[in-house]
Image (cartoon, helix red, strand yellow):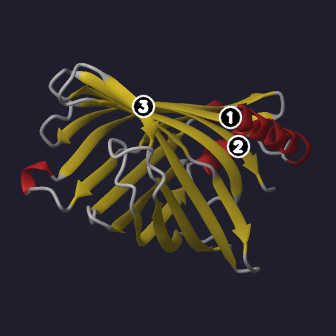
Amino acid sequence: MKATMILITILSLMATTLFAQKSKAELAKATQNPLAAMYSLPFQNNTTYGYGDFNRAQNVLNIQPVLPFSLSSKINLINRIILPVITQPSFTEDKSSTGTGDISWSAWLSPSKASKIIWGLGPVMQIPTASSSEFGSGEFGIGPSFVALTMIDKWVAGIVTNNVWTFGDKEENKFIFQYFINYNLPDAWYIVSAPIMTANWNASSDNRWVVPFGGGAGKVIKIGKLPININAQVFYNVVKPDGIGDWQSRVQVQFLFPKG
């Protein structure tokens, strides 16, 4: 936690000296583009309610820094690293335990020149950092990842998807698909729907998919010169495996450090 606060402080000083000219409205739209040339540090908290036989909540806090780099005048490399901190209910006892999951690292190559369709393509890797088998397979994995989006007036819409195969005793085969639709309002407010759909291809067909539907709202604010994107969403799981609750919520606080 101390290291995280030091990182936020350093990046905050960078934002103060270099990025004060960015308006909140510009930043709101930029936050909705996963391929934006902007350093950011999101803390995304996802809660699923009614989990397991004891009707407890599963909580996953994703710490997911985004680090863009320019490889040439035409190509950017956008790195997104996701470290999950998981509170997992027990299926056999009325208690929960907390630990870290496996890291997911996506590296998208994307054209630096803007066009009507913005896209990125590259590998996604699973790094075995799970603190125990409760929180992840602890296996190395790799697969393809793809991002595409468009911006039309006040609208930003697109998809993020990947599939990971792991190498080890569990041999996971898992798929993630997220669509996102944003409508930007005055004063850096916006409406958003960005559910994350997942599939475990190794599970039976009745327990393979989690398909949520819903949305929420957000706003970009500034504390001093540091811009922060805050949003909250609620989802209903229209398809889900046995033992998973009907409702999810998501709250995200994202510290923004645009490159220019």
User: In the displayed structure, does residue 25 sit left or right of residue 219?
Assistant: right
Relative to 196, residue 8 above or below: above
Q: Are marks 1 and 2 in contact (CB under 8 Å)?
A: yes
The residue type indicated by label 1 comes to Ile
Q: CA distance from mark 1 to mark 2?
A: 6 Å
Label 1 Cα crowd, 10 Å radius (few <14 / some 14-19 / many 20+): many
The numbered mark, 1 or 2, whose residue comes first in the sequence reads 1
The residue tagged 3 is 98
Q: Please give the name of the residue rendered at 32% of the width and 41% of the height, measured from the top-left corner.
A: 134
Relative to 16, residue 147 above or below: below
Label 1: element kind: strand
The residue type indicated by label 2 comes to Leu
Q: Please give the name of the residue rendered at 40% of the width and 45% of the height, measured from the top-left corner.
A: 194
User: In the displayed structure, does residue 46 sit left or right of residue 96?
Assistant: right
User: In the displayed structure, does residue 132 sit left or right of residue 120?
Assistant: left
User: In the displayed structure, does residue 127 sit left or right of residue 166?
Assistant: right
Tell me the quarter of the picture where residue 128 sits.
bottom left
Say which quadrant the N terminus sits in: top right
In the foreground, 82 or 251: 82
Q: Please give the name of the residue rendered at 86% of the width and 41% of the height, measured from the top-left corner.
A: 20
Q: CA distance from mark 3 to mark 2?
A: 28 Å
Label 3 Cα crowd, 10 Å radius (few <14 / some 14-19 / many 20+): some
The residue tagged 1 is 228
The residue tagged 2 is 256
Label 2 Cα crowd, 10 Å radius (few <14 / some 14-19 / many 20+): many
Q: Residue 162 in the image: x percent, y percent?
A: 38, 65
Q: CA distance from mark 1 to mark 3?
A: 27 Å
Tell me the quarter of the picture where residue 66 sits.
bottom right
Label 2: element kind: strand
